[in-house]
Image (tube, rainbow, N blue to C red):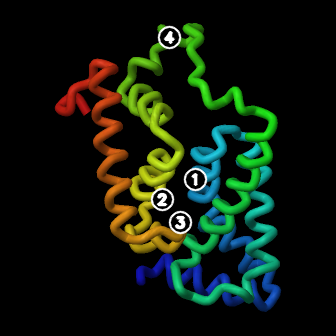
Amino acid sequence: MNNKSIDELDLLEKVSQGDERSFNELFQLTHRRVYIYLYCLLRDKQIAEDVLVETYLEVWKGAKKFKGYSRVLTWIIGIARNLGMNELKKRKKFEDIDNFQNISNENMFNEEAFSRDGLIKKAIEQLSFKHREILDLVFFQEMSYQEISELLNIPLNTVKTRVFYAKELLKAILKTMGVEKDEL
């Protein structure tokens, strides 16, 4: 366990006792990573911000329920994931059309689309939800495979398999976009 995890655990323990200052410190320490996760999940800035607020409200109310089976950040992202998934289910009822890719050409020739990061972002957006999520958790949230297994409630080998296939699919998508492996 690293120092950051120990700090988060100490802060959460104080939060469970109603310490508002510790709650603010925990928020400052973790909210960026939780927001990035939510934004990648929901693909909407305003909704991600709303779910972030709901997430930390649940952290405040549920701090006493933390069992310590995972890192505090993993627990918080688990709360965020559940709330985000609920939001996606609500939206799906009204927006089934979103299952289709946006094929407008309005941004086809902007510079970002041709930059390295822009290409990678566009390629990741073409992945399925489960593959986008697994890459986000591994590379951007820096979670271990074990933590992801617990968060998603799937076997460890399934995590490994998803990561492998997500990376392979991403390589294939980038190749169709004209990006070779050594260009990254």
Q: Say which residue label 1 marks.
A: 37
Q: Nearer the viewer, mark 4 or mark 3?
A: 3
Secondary structure state at the residue bearing disc 3: helix
Q: Say which residue label 4 marks.
A: 108
Label 1 or label 3, whichever comes before in sequence order: 1
Decide which of 128, 12 is in the foreground and name it.
Answer: 128
Under mark 3, the amino acid is: Leu
Label 4 or label 2, whichever comes before in sequence order: 4
Judged left or right of residue 164, residue 53 is right
Distance (Cα) linking label 4 and label 2: 30 Å
Q: Nearer the viewer, mark 2 or mark 3?
A: 3
Residue drawn at the location 38% of the way across and 70% of the way down: 156
Q: Disc 4, disc 1: CB below 8 Å? A: no
Secondary structure state at the residue bearing disc 2: loop
Quadrant housing residue 25? bottom right
Secondary structure state at the residue bearing disc 4: loop
